[in-house]
Image: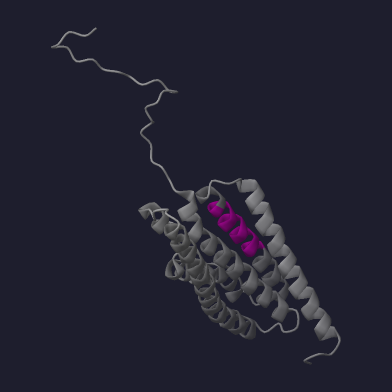
Amino acid sequence: MAAPNQLQIVIPKENGAVPKMEEEIDYFERAQWLRAAVLGANDGLVTIASLILGVGALKHDARAIILTGFAGLFAGACSMAIGEFVSVYTQLDIEKGQMKREKGMGEDESEKEKERLPNPWQAAAASALAFSLGAVVPLLAAAFITDHRVRVGVVVAATTLGLLGFGGAGAVLGRTKVVRACVRVVVGGWMAMAITFGLTKLLGSSGFGM
């Protein structure tokens, strides 16, 4: 037993009741904006790259392709922001209604639960900004290349690197498996670009729009 004038220091064991001093991250709350950001970035990459490849399948004019890409960027960013805002606001109304029903049944509404509610404005801004950042990658890759075949190869390569980067970043921030996330987004992006290029080429060879 320690003497009255002695200071007794207790070092907690690793498996003891005293918790470790470490930062706790709420990944549920992080997922609200992370989902919108990753979705927006991937959508921007794949959509604009597919537009560039699709239009390039019929027209080799670099100016027309770049203008189409910028039109897709503006339209896609607005569409993503509005769509994300509406969908998340609907989710917010549903969750608020559920919390009110639970409160009426005697359950208190905690501050932590309020903080976990989805934020439509945050989701819309993250989605639009991420879409724009993703769309810039294939646009920059195609902007300064005049040769059609070289442009296609550079756009596909730049888009693949962008998908790997955004997929890996989302996996790291969300603490999920990096390799699985990267493979999923890259394969999906390749499929979208191949389908767009193939169908546009098919329409052009059939005389549609010529």
8 horizontally vs 148: left or right: left
**Image location of residue 139, percent across then percent down:** 58, 73
**Image location of residue 88, percent across then percent down:** 51, 68
Colour approach in the figure? one colour
Give the extent of the magenta segment.
Answer: 157-170
- What residue is drawn where x is 41% and y is 23%? 16
**Image location of residue 189, percent across then percent down:** 68, 64
> Relative to the observer, which residue lies in front, 185 or 154?
185
> Relative to the observer, which residue lies in front, 49 or 13?
13
Q: Main secondary structure of the magenta part?
A: helix
Residue 144 is at least partly visible in this image: no
- Whether residue 161 is in magenta: the answer is yes
- Whether residue 56 is in magenta: the answer is no
> Relative to the observer, which residue lies in front, 99 or 77?
99
- Name the quadrant containing residue 18: top left
- What residue is drawn where x is 58% and y is 46%? 176
169 shown above or below 145: above
Residue 94 is at least partly visible in this image: yes
Q: Which residue is most to the right?
A: 206
Q: Which residue is most to the left?
A: 5
> Relative to the observer, which residue lies in front, 173 or 114?
114
Q: Which residue is most to the bottom?
A: 210
- What residue is drawn where x is 70% and y is 62%? 188
- What residue is drawn where x is 58% and y is 70%? 44
63 shown above or below 46: below
25 shown above or below 64: above
